[in-house]
Image (tube, rainbow, N blue to C red):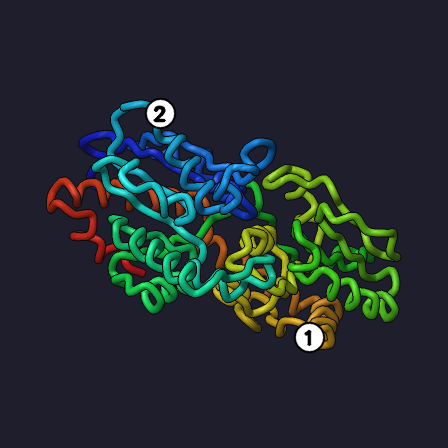
Amino acid sequence: MGDLSRTQTCRCDVVLEQTLGHVTHGQNLRRLLPELPGFEPTFVSVEYDVDGWAARVPGFGNWTVRAGLRARRGLRSLGRHERDAVFVHTQVPAVFLGRATGRVPTIVSLDATPLQYDELGEQYAHSTGPAPVERLKTWLNRRCFERADHLVAWAHWTKRGLVADYGVDAGNVTVIPPGVDISRWGREERAAQRGNEPVRILFVGGNLARKGGDELLAAFGHLRSHHGAGVELHLATPTPLAPIDGVTVHNDMRPNSPELIDLYHRCDVFCLPTRGDCLPMVLPEAGAAGLAMISTDVGAISEIVRDGETGLLVPVGEPEQLHRALERLVSDAELRIRLAGNGSALIRAEHDAAANAARLGELICDVVASRAEHGTGRARSERWTR
């Protein structure tokens, strides 16, 4: 921890959006932040669901409005307790927090800017609105970023979007990726393929179509016709599928569960030919678990799947190239082992959840100390710039 932890406790309200991969990120922060010396977090969950009478309230169907109101209500429910800072992940619940955080420093974390999300919107069934609405949305988010004492970006891709599209000072943005629990997800490096066992390919994704699962199934069909029982495909997805030769569907896997971790450890190749993503949490999990990775070059994926170094990148919507990449890894055990080893080293160095939670806690305490010393949380941000 930083200097603050040696003199007093840093009390921080931690507001967490609970959608998609943010659920796993929230689980990690809830477990790790309370373990930091000199850091005392109080958590507020912002759930996505909307049903019953709430679905009929005008404007409540909009996720930004709903998230902001729930974040405000969650902070109010804590009462007038002493807090030194408010940390909000993501910017969605932060946009309408306004004065709800009081006069304490606010740190906002995000995996993608709204404009970056708009670029991927078609894959998320998300569409932009009329020009006046979009201008208002951009203004609201720009104001949110300007009001924050500091911003935390999941990836350098995210940071570039903040600087280029919203005019944020690069010195006020720190890249701290979401992490994976290495102690649970790590696996001993494989020296060779296990006996006569098949090469097992793993896909993990809630939305099979958006994540490219249909293209993977087609490519696997070609692999199966060539390698027969020497190759298997395991799909961890809630999407129901009819039986397919060589394919096992796991419909009941929960994030961070021992069953899911064991499935990763039993596989050799991780394949996510996604059509639209920011920084999928499944990739650092795959890297930590020692799997050679295949994915597409969208969002910040190339910061983890470095082509020819930690995995193979294929273009979106190119089933032939996906098939060739899979064939390379299925046929070349030495390549699989090399990519898996490099990927594991990268995740341990940059995506260790415990180390990154400590970095986050220290950053928050540093911003608090800077506000107390200089009247702004930005005065000492230079040492955090990455």
**Residue 198 x %, y %:** 80, 58
Label 2 CA crowd tier, 10 Å (few <14, some 14–19, many 20+): few
Determine whether, in the image, residue 294 is placed left or right of residue 21. Answer: right
Quadrant of the image for the N terminus?
A: top left
Q: Amino acid at mark 1?
A: Glu
Question: Mark 1 and 2 residues: CB-CB less than 8 Å, in contact?
Answer: no
Q: What SS does tag 2 mark?
A: loop
Label 1 CA crowd tier, 10 Å (few <14, some 14–19, many 20+): few
Which residue occupies 51% across, 57% down? 279
* Residue that numbered label 2 is attached to: 78
Residue 81: name its quadrant.
top left
Which residue occupies 12% across, 45% down? 375
**Residue 67 x %, y %:** 45, 41
**Residue 195 x %, y %:** 79, 56
Determine whether, in the image, residue 128 is placed left or right of residue 102. Answer: right
Name the one closer to the observer, 243 or 75.
Answer: 75
Q: Earlier in the sequence, mark 1 or mark 2?
A: 2
Which residue occupies 34% across, 48% down? 108
Give the number of the disc on residue 318.
1
* Number of numbered markers: 2
Seen in the picture, residue 64 relative to 156 is either above or below; the reply is above
Q: Amino acid at mark 2?
A: Leu
**Residue 223 x %, y %:** 81, 68
Quadrant of the image for the C terminus?
A: bottom left
